[in-house]
Amino acid sequence: MARWQPNASQRLVVAALELFEERGYDNTTVIGIAERAGLTKSTFFRHFPDKREVLFGGGTMAELVADGIAEAPPEAGPLDAVAHALDVIGREAFPPERREFAARRQAVIAAHPELREREALKGLGLTAAMIDALERRGVPDLTARVAAELCGVAWKIAYERWSDPANDDEFGELARRTLTEVQAVAESQGRS
């Protein structure tokens, strides 16, 4: 086996997804994932702390969110700053060619409580990253928290819609539309 091979992280992710689909999450081992990817167990642990994390990309998404909010135009309000981040994420993390993988990933996560828990924790981390990034822009705490929570809901719905193989919308466009829908629902509840 070669000492260094390109795309090790992505190969491990693909191998893990295949094995989770074939054998189930509980019957898949780190060694099995590494072997399927043509790598070693130590290479696996250089990229991921455990088999659960292999489908969640570490802190990459939180970094993209924070950077996207920071790069939003100075005059952008909280929701517009987060919408800008959603556009960045769409370009960087959710290109159309990842849609099939995303749908398969979602099916594996839905079938395993431990992975659903990790998905929920990741969502909380993303919301926290949005709050922090908005506060660094000078947005007051309560406003930042409400905007981040609304955007977290919109993100989850948009991702579910985007991962549907029947959908061919770009993620950023879909996320913005969903954010508008969520905002409209929140505003209508305030008038009730």
Image (spheres, grey):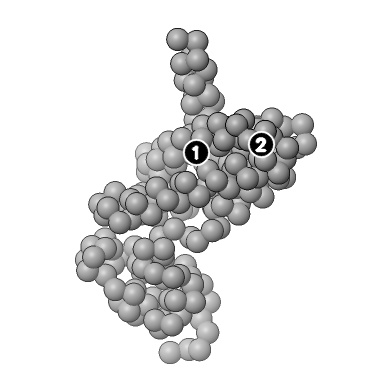
Q: Which residue is at 33% across, 55% downward? A: 115
Q: x%, y% of residue 186?
A: 49, 21
The amino acid on which the numbered mark 2 sits, given as a three-letter code, is Ala
Q: Which residue is at 71% across, 44% downward? A: 136
Under circle 1, the secondary element is helix
Which quarter of the rendering shows the N terminus? Answer: bottom left
Density class for disc 1 (Cα within 10 Å; few <14, some 14-19, many ≥20) is many
Which quarter of the rendering shows the C terminus? Answer: top left
Residue found farthest to the front:
141
Residue found farthest to the right:
74
Q: Which mark is residue 190?
A: none
**Count of picture labels:** 2
Under circle 2, the secondary element is helix
Relative to 153, 137 lies left or right = right
According to the picture, the residue beneath numbered tag 2 turns out to be 81
Residue 167 visible in this rendered orientation of the protein: no
The amino acid on which the numbered mark 1 sits, given as a three-letter code, is Gly
Residue 82 visible in this rendered orientation of the protein: yes
Q: x%, y% of residue 126?
A: 52, 47
Q: x%, y% of residue 185?
A: 47, 20
According to the picture, the residue beneath numbered tag 1 turns out to be 152
Q: Which residue is at 40% across, 60% downward? A: 55
Residue found farthest to the top:
192
In the picture shown, does residue 185 fall above or below 63?
above
Closest to the observer, 191 or 26: 191
Of callouts 1 and 2, the N-terminal one: 2
Closest to the observer, 109 or 121: 121
Relative to 170, 87 lies left or right = right
Relative to 14, 66 lies left or right = right
